[in-house]
Amino acid sequence: MSDVLKQTGATMAYSVIVADDHALVRQGVKGAIEAGEDFEVAAEAADGIQAIIQVKKHRPDLLVLDIAMPHSNGIEVIDEVHRWSPETKILVLTGLTTGGVLRQARQAGADGVFLKSDDIDALLGAARDIMAGREVFSPRVREALDRPALGADLTPRERQVLQALARGDTIALIADRLGISANTADKHRTSIMRKLGVHSAGELMALAHREGLLEISRHT
């Protein structure tokens, strides 16, 4: 447990950092978390880099973290938190509802995941459960996680090609960077579209972003 547990009246309060690029969300989360005397918000952060800096400074007991933020996305922040403050628990609060994104958060090591559209009053109970050592996923998150993962059958090479297509790379450039022929790169693209059930490059990119098949960036 962090050494920043603070004395609040007759109780010991867990220290919390709230990281979200929207001030109204941070204020709402702070109010919901501090509704109980056992939590105190030690700092706030409006982007991923600031979240990492504040975690290094405070070593909080709990980080409430958005996924899509400027400068460093939530998955990268989780990795850094595990490196610099491994005892800090992480509650992801996101507006992204696709199973792929939520799975990334869970696989990265989040102790709980809630949607911003969930009942904010449930956050305090979730935070307490997490500090008690339990994983907490809201019912809607659990439902999304239980659905079959779209794109699970893509090969590692196909995922490389998909990421390159998302950057706007041409087939010729993809082939050059991956050390394969243009014909092979084009076959990978065709296979990706078939597996995902799309029929155009535009549909492919829209689906990939919507379902969290690409590296998370700021898209909220």
Image: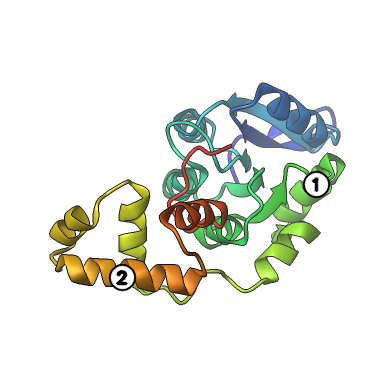
Residue 14 point in image, percent of width and height: 70, 39
As drawn, the residue found furthest toward the front would be: 199
Residue 170 point in image, percent of width and height: 24, 52
Q: Earlier in the sequence, mark 2 or mark 1?
A: 1
Instruction: Say which of 171 and 144 sits in front.
Output: 171
Q: Is residue 23 left or right of residue 37?
A: left
Residue 41 point in image, percent of width and height: 69, 29
In this rendering, does residue 32 appear at all?
yes
Residue 7 point in image, percent of width and height: 74, 30
108 in relation to 57, above or below: below
Q: Callout 2, which amino acid?
A: His
Q: Residue at x 55, y 69 (%)?
A: 150
> Which quadrant is home to the C terminus?
top right
Q: Which residue is mark 1?
A: 118
As drawn, the residue found furthest toward the bottom would be: 153
156 in relation to 168, above or below: below
Which is more foreground, mark 2 or mark 1? 2
Q: Residue at x 44, y 37 (%)?
A: 72
| SS assignment at label 1 | loop
Q: Callout 1, which amino acid?
A: Asp
7 in relation to 175, above or below: above
In this rendering, does residue 134 appear at all?
no
Q: Which residue is mark 2?
A: 188
Instruction: Say which of 103 and 80 sits in front.
Output: 103
Instruction: Say which of 219 and 195 sits in front.
Output: 195
Which quadrant would residue 190 be assigned to in this image? Answer: bottom left
Q: Residue at x 46, y 77 (%)?
A: 153
Is the C-beta separation of discs 2 and 1 under 8 Å?
Answer: no
Q: How many C-alpha atoms fall within 10 Å of the one at disc 2: few (<14), some, or many (≥20)? A: many
Real-space CA distance between mark 2 and mark 1, rounded to the nearest whole angstrom: 39 Å
